[in-house]
Image: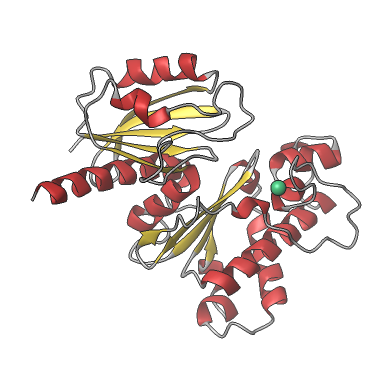
């Protein structure tokens, strides 16, 4: 089985070809520009690849409601040219194969559940902490969509006691993304994250906000694994700080060994590493193909 995979990020696109075991055979990446220019590169890459299906994990917000007239569209993004763009339709007009379509973070959650840190589990939550913050939710064997799709990057959290920063989210100011995304970190400290020392107050604040968000998700969804990826999490010192803070916030209330004694194995980086997004897109493509074959039968 040859599955075309697209990890459509706000700053970078990654295209690849994978198989039913989540192995990636070849890939390319390029900067995200206006849709016509970007999609031309996508189409060129896949033109001679003879894929059986495709999967797209996309930046959002996007329309993933099959009954909606704008299914397959990017909806309200401020990225130039992309708002109202028919992403799935553009590919469908050229490649006559089943196409799986979901948010980048839902794709990553599915990939991690199939082949990564949550392999064998029927639930996990996947956070990406990068330029923005997104959350993908896999629960009882299904990706959660609900009304539109979860937007857990914009939840409100308690404020760090020493933080006077107003936040940068154009919609909410000091929501999680407004306070703890890579862009927020840069705006608050007037420096790139990787130029700050590992014991800088910036990381204590990062861990504080991320831990509050994760604690709420643990209390709400009770996931069996919490996976945190994205550029900011390359600061590996954040993991022990987040685990400790989550332990402090929950304070023994959630009486599971996963949290009380084994939190080191509960809040983890992606098992698929840098491949989480692309493998997730492969998983979406594999699922779209299986669904079509199932319908035929
Ligand atoms: Zn927000």
Is 171 placed left or right of 112 in the picture?
A: right
Q: Quadrant of the N terminus?
A: top left
Q: Residue 292: x percent and y percent?
A: 18, 44
Nearest the viewer among 102 and 128 is: 102
Report the residue at 40% width, 37% height from top.
Answer: 69
In this figure, which colouring scheme has been used for the structure?
A: secondary structure
Residue 200 seen in the current view: no
Q: Residue 125: x percent and y percent?
A: 50, 60
Report the residue at 14% width, 46% height from top.
Answer: 293
Is 208 placed left or right of 143 in the picture?
A: right
Q: Say which quarter of the image contains residue 82.
A: top right
Report the residue at 38% width, 21% height from top.
Answer: 42
Q: Residue 80: x percent and y percent?
A: 61, 22
Q: Say which quarter of the image contains residue 131.
A: top right
Report the residue at 19% width, 25% height from top.
Answer: 50
Nearest the viewer among 18 and 85 is: 85
Q: Residue 85: x percent and y percent?
A: 48, 26
In the displayed structure, would residue 189 be above or below residue 297? Answer: above
Q: Say which quarter of the image contains residue 57.
A: top left
Residue 229 seen in the current view: yes
């Amino acid at each position: 089985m040859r599955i075309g995979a697209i990890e459509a990020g706000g700053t970078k696109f990654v295209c690849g070809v994978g198989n039913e075991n989540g192995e990636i055979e070849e890939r390319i990446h390029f900067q995200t520009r206006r849709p016509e220019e970007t999609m031309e590169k996508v189409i060129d890459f896949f033109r001679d690849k003879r894929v059986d299906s495709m999967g797209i994990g996309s930046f959002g917000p996007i329309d993933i409601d099959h009954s909606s007239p704008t299914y397959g569209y990017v909806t309200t993004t401020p990225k130039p040219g992309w708002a109202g763009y028919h992403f799935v339709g553009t590919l469908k007009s050229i490649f006559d194969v089943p196409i799986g379509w979901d948010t980048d973070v839902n794709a990553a959650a599915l990939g991690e559940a199939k082949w990564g840190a949550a392999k064998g589990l029927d639930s996990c939550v996947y956070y990406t902490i990068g330029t923005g913050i997104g959350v993908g939710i896999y629960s009882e064997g299904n990706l959660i969509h609900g009304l539109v799709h979860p937007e857990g990057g914009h939840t409100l959290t308690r404020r760090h006691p020493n933080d006077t920063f107003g936040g940068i989210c154009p919609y909410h100011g000091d929501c999680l993304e407004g306070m703890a995304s890579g862009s927020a970190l840069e705006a608050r400290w007037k420096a790139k994250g990787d130029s700050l020392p590992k014991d800088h107050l910036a990381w204590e604040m990062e861990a504080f906000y991320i831990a509050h968000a994760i604690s709420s998700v643990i209390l709400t969804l009770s996931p069996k694994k919490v996976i945190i990826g994205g550029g900011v999490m390359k600061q590996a010192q954040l993991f022990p700080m987040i685990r400790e803070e989550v332990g402090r916030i929950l304070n023994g209330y959630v009486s599971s060994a996963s949290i009380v004694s084994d939190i080191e194995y509960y809040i983890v980086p992606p098992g698929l590493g840098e491949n989480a997004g692309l493998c997730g897109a492969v998983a979406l493509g594999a699922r779209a193909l299986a669904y079509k074959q199932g319908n035929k039968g």
